[in-house]
Image: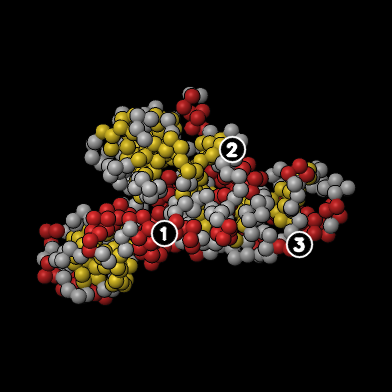
Amino acid sequence: MSDLLAKVNERRTFAIISHPDAGKTTITEQMLLFGGVIRNAGTVKARKTGHYATSDWMEIEKKRGISVTSSVMQFEFQGKRVNILDTPGHQDFSEDTYRTLMAVDAAVMVIDAAKGIEPQTKKLFKVVKQRGIPIFTFMNKLDRDGREPLDLIAELEEVLGIEGVAMNWPIGMGQTLQGLYDLRNQRVELYRKSDADRFVPLDAAGDLPADEPLASDPQFKETQEAIELIKMAGNQFNRSKIIAGQQTPVYFGSALTNFGVETFLNSFVDLAPAPASHSVNEGEELAPDTPEFAGFVFKIQANMNPQHRDRIAFVRICSGEFHKGMDVQLARTGKTIRLNNATEFMSSQRVQVADAVAGDIVGLYDTGNFQIGDSIYTGKKQVFAPLPEFTPELFVRVSAKNVMKQKSFHKGINQLVQEGAIQLYQNYQTDDYILGAVGQLQFEVFQFRMQNEYHSAVTMESIGHRVARWIKPEQLDPSMSSSRNLLVKDRYGNPLFLFENEFAQRFFQDKYPDVVLTEKI
């Protein structure tokens, strides 16, 4: 095995997905704790103490206790290099999440054991399923009363269409929680016990030692009966099915009380795949141990350090090795760029990186060279498949409150638009700025960040839901515009109409039958 392949095989790169408030950020914190990179886990419940979740680095996230941007974190665990991408749970930021899911080799799905599968989880699971990547399920909040474990596993199959295979099983729940029956490791993990004695081995018959108080507890006997049932009638563990994304290992636990998380992480780094090949050049496969470097930009973030007004392009390395100071080609422009300044992340903490390999995520300091979806490479030209784009549905007119601050207003708009969460348009006749987004929260975050990071207060006037459709410039006559179909241009100068509703679009197409309208340019 080559030295490069050995390094690649140590990588585990995954995203955490969930519905808001299922505990995704909390489990991320606990993993970082086991990775030795933080001393205590800050949760969204600890805002009054000044402890914030490490993965929520943005000011608005600390104030509101939500994740609205994908964070990237790295740590060493059990001889593996783990890259976690913590994604926003809020549906208004699904675009950022969808792109992030293109940059990982596996996904961890966090489900609230009281609520089961919720709408946002279902949407994100669909993307994971389309990619065929392995998915690991953590049934969270076992410290509270929740649904029957059998119901939760059955729901995976019924709602998501994936086999669930139990890796451990709760002994009680909420007030009666006493531990986890660990099928994979043939042991019981006791609840609220210290490190030294929390694991009790089971004998060949699946019984606890006679001197263990839990051994004679009726609740443990009930758990043993449930285990017998799932061994006979449940799905059988199948590693190849897991790797193909057809079966998900299911773990129970409580991220808030740090129960079951270490066992889950141990199992994950063992079962999750190392980086795989990526599709390039419309049909070729690029192996991760190909010597030449190649990667793609899946995220751009402005002002990770507001004092320095910096802009970071996040790159998933797909082949070869990164070395500080190397020259790469940017496929879109053919331009040569020297990568002198690259970082790895512990959320808002960052360290300069000299070397990285396929599977790693690096942040490149960017002066405006990169766009989301860009391919960079050395040697043979490698162009990765396009990343998903969403057509906005909500629109607002935006202007600077203080006309004397136009410079910071324009700088802020341009930098935040390049992150991809909001789209920028201009009225075709007046050049007024119009912003488009998938959800309302994106506008609130934009307004907050303009004020907080660029010291530019903005006025936003809603023009509501619109249907955006592009038109070929050669077919455009500005007189086609009306109050019901606003004519604008995107930031690349391409014309499009913002129709009041689908009826207005149909009326337009009846009036101009030869005009071709498209959802994307």
Q: Residues within 10 Å of mark 3 (few under 14, many from 20)?
A: few
Give the residue at x 30% y 65%: 458
Q: Is residue 124 above or below residue 299?
A: below
Please name the residue that numbered disc 3 is placed on. Answer: 176
Q: Is residue 110 above or below residue 382?
A: below
Element marked by disc 2: strand
> In the image shown, does 91 or 32 lie closer to the viewer?
32
Q: Amino acid at mark 1?
A: Phe
Element marked by disc 3: helix
Q: Is residue 53 left or right of residue 192?
A: left
N-term-proximal mark, 1 vs 2 = 2
Q: To which quarter of the image does residue 465 belong?
A: bottom left
Q: Amino acid at mark 3?
A: Thr
Please name the residue that numbered disc 1 is placed on. Answer: 93
> In the image shown, does 358 or 134 lie closer to the viewer?
358
Residue that extends furthest to the front in the rendered view of this protein: 404
Element marked by disc 1: helix
Give the residue at x 26% y 73%: 500
Q: To which quarter of the image does residue 469 belong?
A: bottom left
Give the residue at x 35% y 50%: 302
Give the residue at x 69% y 44%: 184
Q: Is residue 505 left or right of residue 296?
A: left
Please name the residue that numbered disc 2 is placed on. Answer: 77
On the image, the x and y values in percent for residue 362 come to: 42, 39
